Image (spheres, rainbow, N blue to C red):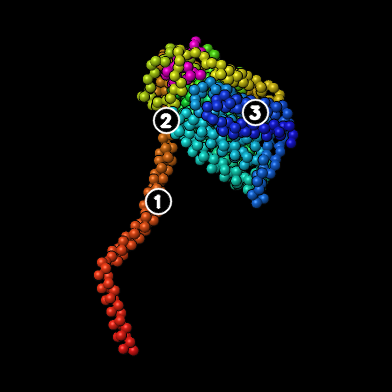
Amino acid sequence: MTGAQTLGALLPAVPFGLALVGLLLPQRSRAVAAGLGIGGAAVALVCAVALAVTVDHGGTESAAEWIDFGGLSVTLSVRLDPATALVAIAVAVVALAVQVYSVGYLHDDDRYAPYAAQISLFTAAMLLVVVAGDLIMLLVGWEVMGICSYLLIGHDRRLPEAPAAAVKAFLVTRVGDVGFLLGIVVLGVSAGSFRISDVLAHDFSPGTLTAACLLLLAGVAGKSAQFPLHTWLPDAMAGPTPISALIHAATMVAAGIYAVTRLFPLFERAPAALAVLGVMAAVTLLLGALAATAQDDIKRVLAWSTVSQLGYMAGALAVGSPPAALFHLLSHAAFKALLFLAAGAVIHAVGSNLMSAMGGLRRPMPVTFWCTAIGLGALAGVPPLAGFWSKDGILVVAEQAARHHAGPAPAWVGWLVWIAGLVGVGLTAWYAARLLLRTFLGPSRAQTHPMDASAGIDAPATAPAHTPVGPPHDPPGLLRWPVLLLTVPSAALGFAVFVPPFRSALALDEAHLDAFLIIPVALLLLGAGLAWWRWRADPAADPATGLGPLRPAFARAFWLDEVQHALVVRPVRALGRLARRIDETVVDGAVEGTGRSTAGLGGGLDLLHRAGVPRAVAAVLAGALLLGIAAVALGGSA
């Protein structure tokens, strides 16, 4: 095994081993738990950086047989290339920032020890997905992430909505995972191997390949919150804010996009699957952006923003550009983790998730303000921040697919993704500017923040995580330094497109550098300008009031949750009640009825056999007499 292969194996193994140790710790072992969690993430980061330096551009792979199923083997396979190393670095950086941040954010949590261990296990599972060279290994990491998300979203048991959000995330993603598992089975059985290199090299029939890719997309829709399996992600905000950063930035939601990039040669040969992915991406992009425009909970704004940005990544894949999708995945990991951790600092300071309870925080929280401004600028695509380069690269490849029929998907997919992406630029700028203005500028609304029931805004998804002590102020060092760390790539990662090794690692071409800037920049200025104009007219009012009658629809994400509840949840529950009733009345009724009938028959026979001794003796003698007479009569006649 080469040095690069050893580093690839250590990437998931180190945090996994420390997670197992952490899970065995007593719950009061805060210092040891923190050391294990931070140490595991730090070692993973060192391994990822070393891997980026040592791995060959052409990639490397090692495999050892694990299990054999009648000639169909499952291998412990590690498949590495420069793009793998970059994604691993992003995962490790965000995991390290979250572990450090959590020490301060959950300083009074009596269940911190298992929490830190679960984060390490979550990190190990994502890194296993990143380096896996076998589909079954990838599936193991994929499923462990689902378990960890359930545990971490429901961590705060004081919040009544946390268990429900955890169960919803688990069940919705499991729906997609059924398809993902079936897709892996189809590919592995058809190719005679589960190794990714063997699967990519196999010549599948068109029908088999299309069916397998569509099944895989079901899992991608669940994990990466694509329409229609996106509804779990906003509700997952019931989890602690550091977990929101981890899920939204570097694990879970990134797994689906990354899996498609690993298997993209298969999707290239299945244009029907790419067309489905394009439609799914465009709907997800616009749905997430529109929903983000009307939220009052700062974390839900960022959550719906994640849904929209995942739509951009899926759109890049649909038009045939995995490099553009990976580039946006990396930049999104930086600025979205930054935004969630900065939002946690704001919540920590004001004691509320609601922007209607904020305002005027720029002066008392200058560090948080500037970090948030950079993160929101990267999210909106303000030049020259990271999101500008990565998002513009997606728009360029979508425009080429639309106008020049470039890429494996039909041309109409390119038009759909390009137009949706352009509209998304304006919407993203609008809600990013609204969040910055409502949170940090204008008058403080800390004491008076009634809910706008007429606009269809419900109570906050999460209760205040902390009771603020004194006036708002920038967070202490354990919360501040991770935010500052993530500000650097959020601002500067885009310039990496001019660094040959980075461009080579992601296979970026000149199209990503020679972007057509006028339309996206104009839409960005239009969206941000409209939000500023609405806010400037009345700094105490919410710019979202300008949405008018559309605001309730946007705030409730077009009531898709309610539709899902009516069409899926209620029928399934009714079916469950019917099955229970049938079981109780028919199955259990037959068993219990047989028992009651037998007991009743026995009781009746018991009554017939009950008699006093004189009567019983008389009956016996009478019977004997009758038998004797019958015997004599029969004997005489013979």
- Residue furthest to the top: 363
Q: Sequence-wise, which precedes: disc 2 or disc 1?
A: 2
- Given residues 17 and 567, the one toward you in this image is 17
Mark 2 vs 3, N-terminal side: 3
Amino acid bearing label 3: Ala
Q: Are marks 3 and 1 in contact (CB under 8 Å)?
A: no
Residue 348 highlighted magenta (yes or no): yes
**Residue drawn at x 56%, y 33% as measured from the top left:** 23
Residue located 42% across and 15% down the image = 446
The magenta segment: 345-365
Question: Circle 2: is it few (<14), some (14-19), or many (20+) Cα within 10 Å?
Answer: few
* Depth check, front residue: 324 or 514: 324
**Quadrant of the drawing holding the C terminus:** bottom left
On the rendered image, what quadrant is the N terminus found in?
top right
In the rendered image, residue 545, in percent from the top left (x then y), is placed at 41, 20
Which amino acid does the dot numbered 2 rest on?
Pro
Residue under label 2, please give it. Answer: 160
SS class, disc 1 = helix
Q: Which residue has dot 1 on it?
A: 583
